[in-house]
Image (tube, rainbow, N blue to C red):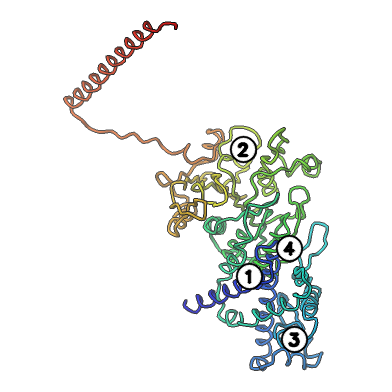
């Protein structure tokens, strides 16, 4: 554990050092800082992963002082044999592309060009595994020409040297050996300054780990293998990572869509850090609603925290076409005359997810709590279908402010095409958790014990007073398809045994208080009338 914390501390120091280099060259809080930090960190990770795997394949290289030199001196045939023997998810690097080689040659002229050329060549040679596709099939670059973000060309060599020197200071290789599973923590630290929901039309929404863990543990209560997992609004991948950890990274493939290039880049980094490199080719940058890449495919597990409201008026009419009729069975929100940004796009994501489930598929979707009780419209049509088809496994209504970024109360829908429709769990967890201050915001945090209580109560289909009810689909139909646990809780009346004398005494007390109130009221009436009579026009 101490060693684990030591590695976390060192890795965070590396990230802080890279940010310091950016600040020293005028890029602190610059829009390009995110690209530099995340790409340089990824280069470091891939470099060390390659070194680690090569040393495992050829133990005699482990003790070489000049590792890149030893690779360089290998006959080309031997090198190709070595590289081809590595797992398909391991990056293929040349000896001159290693950090140690750049470190040893940093004083040569035009170092910035050497640095940029190295990263570009790595991008090209590893595009099949590490590139993100867009809807059109075009692939992005793994790395940009980072030195170009320094506007003063005379400073570029020094900037790239400073980055390489920071990367050379320590190695991830020992962490790979120990199989430490803390890269989720590192990923959050790496992107903490860049993953806000404050900017842009397509803002990234951050899902708290507690919600992600609850969703994954309820979705996958028993071991599964060879399953396909999907998020149509993946963001940086918090939900998908929790789901993959619950299933086991080796037992699942990840698929995702998101309109944001920034989110897709974060997700790629998250997959690399969490042993899911094999799924990077399945990350698609696209508008899932208007240009779904996976429309004809079905998935075993789907998780999503979609944007709740968004102006999609510019492509709303395109969604009416015949090819989307089955998908949007409940309808498409109309364009309001005012407040177009409040269009309920999450209703389209719910329908898209229902359309994308395999025959035995399960899903967990974060929705505004208002969805579960709306008495008409698209909301009610979706709820009716879920009940009539027998796909609702249950709902958990979360505490308010569990998302620091939004005051909207949220619930999580759990869908299962094989659900037990006689035992649907509706849970009101809104009274759980404690409030903590995060910057200017208040946020509700669940303890691990409360997380476990929610998960176990739900998975065991238990009715717990003031927390959960277990109902049938016919009971839900009788309540106008409401998914709110509160509407099914029993109203409890406490009966107290008292004597006839005590009863009469209480009755006399009520009578006296009422007589007193009536008298006081009459006195006030007389006073008001007296004041009115004394009023005169000046």
Q: Image point 55% across, 80% down: which residue?
A: 178
Mark whose residue sits in front, 4 or 2: 4
Rounded to the nearest angstrom, the CA distance separating label 4 from label 1 is 30 Å
Percent position of residue 226, x then y: 66, 65
Mark whose residue sits in front, 4 or 1: 1
Nearest to N terminus: mark 1 or mark 3: 1
Rounded to the nearest angstrom, the CA distance separating label 3 from label 2 is 69 Å
Rounded to the nearest angstrom, the CA distance separating label 2 from label 1 is 51 Å
Q: Which residue is mark 1?
A: 19
Nearest to N terminus: mark 3 or mark 2: 3
Is the residue under label 2 in contact with that under label 4 (CB below 8 Å)? no
Q: Quadrant of the C terminus?
A: top left
**Is disc 4 surrounded by few (<14), some (14 to 19) or many (20+) residues within 10 Å?**
some
Nearest to N terminus: mark 2 or mark 1: 1
Image: 21 above or below 465:
below
**Which circle marks residue 107 in the picture?**
3
Percent position of residue 305, x then y: 62, 52
Query: What is the secondary structure assignment of the residue under circle 4?
Result: helix
Image: 433 above or below 129:
above
Q: Which residue is mark 4?
A: 282
């Amino acid at each position: 554990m101490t060693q684990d914390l030591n590695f976390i501390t060192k890795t965070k120091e590396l990230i802080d050092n890279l940010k310091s280099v950016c600040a020293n060259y005028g890029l602190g809080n610059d829009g390009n800082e995110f690209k530099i930090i995340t790409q340089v960190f990824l280069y470091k990770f891939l470099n060390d992963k390659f070194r680690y795997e090569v040393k495992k394949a050829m133990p005699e290289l482990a003790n070489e002082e000049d590792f890149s030199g030893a690779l360089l001196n290998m006959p080309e045939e031997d090198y190709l044999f070595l590289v081809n023997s590595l797992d398909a998810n391991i990056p293929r690097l040349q000896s001159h592309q290693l950090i140690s080689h750049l470190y040893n040659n940093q004083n040569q002229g035009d170092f910035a060009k050497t640095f940029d050329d190295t990263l570009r060549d790595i991008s090209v040679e590893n595009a099949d595994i590490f590139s993100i596709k867009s809807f059109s099939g075009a692939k992005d670059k793994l790395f940009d020409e980072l030195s170009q973000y320094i506007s003063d060309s005379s400073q570029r060599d020094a900037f790239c040297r400073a980055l390489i020197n920071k990367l050379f200071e320590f190695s991830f290789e020992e962490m790979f050996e120990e199989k430490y599973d803390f890269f989720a923590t590192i990923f959050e630290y790496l992107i903490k300054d860049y993953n806000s929901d404050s900017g842009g039309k397509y803002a990234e929404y951050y899902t708290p780990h507690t919600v992600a863990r609850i969703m994954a543990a309820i979705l996958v209560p028993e071991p599964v293998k060879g399953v396909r997992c999907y998020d149509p609004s993946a963001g940086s991948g918090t939900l998908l990572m929790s789901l993959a950890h619950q299933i086991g990274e080796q037992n699942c493939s990840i698929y995702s869509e998101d309109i944001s290039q920034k989110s897709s880049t974060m997700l790629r980094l998250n997959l690399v850090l969490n042993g899911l490199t094999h799924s990077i080719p399945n990350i698609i940058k696209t508008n899932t609603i208007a240009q779904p890449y996976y429309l004809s495919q079905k998935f075993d597990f789907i998780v999503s925290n979609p944007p709740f409201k968004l102006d999609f008026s510019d492509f709303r009419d395109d969604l009416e076409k015949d090819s989307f009729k089955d998908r949007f069975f409940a309808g498409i929100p109309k364009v309001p005359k005012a407040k177009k940004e409040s269009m309920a796009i999450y209703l389209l994501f719910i329908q898209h997810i229902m359309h994308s489930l395999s025959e035995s598929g399960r899903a967990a979707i974060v929705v505004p709590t208002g969805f579960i009780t709306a008495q008409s419209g698209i909301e009610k049509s979706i709820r009716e279908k879920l009940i009539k088809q027998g796909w609702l496994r249950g709902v958990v209504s979360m505490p308010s402010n569990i998302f620091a970024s939004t005051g909207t109360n949220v619930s999580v829908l759990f869908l299962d095409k094989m659900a037990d429709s006689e035992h649907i769990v509706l849970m009101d967890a809104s009274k759980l958790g404690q409030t903590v201050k995060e910057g200017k915001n208040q946020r509700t945090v669940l303890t691990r014990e409360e997380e476990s209580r929610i998960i176990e109560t739900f998975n065991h289909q238990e009715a717990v007073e003031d927390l959960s009810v277990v109902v049938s689909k016919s009971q839900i139909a009788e309540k106008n398809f409401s998914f709110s646990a509160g509407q099914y809780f029993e109203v409890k009346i406490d009966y107290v045994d008292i004597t006839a004398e005590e009863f009469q005494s209480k009755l006399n007390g009520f009578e006296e208080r009422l007589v007193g109130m009536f008298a006081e009221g009459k006195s006030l009436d007389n006073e008001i009338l007296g004041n009115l009579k004394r009023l005169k026009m000046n």
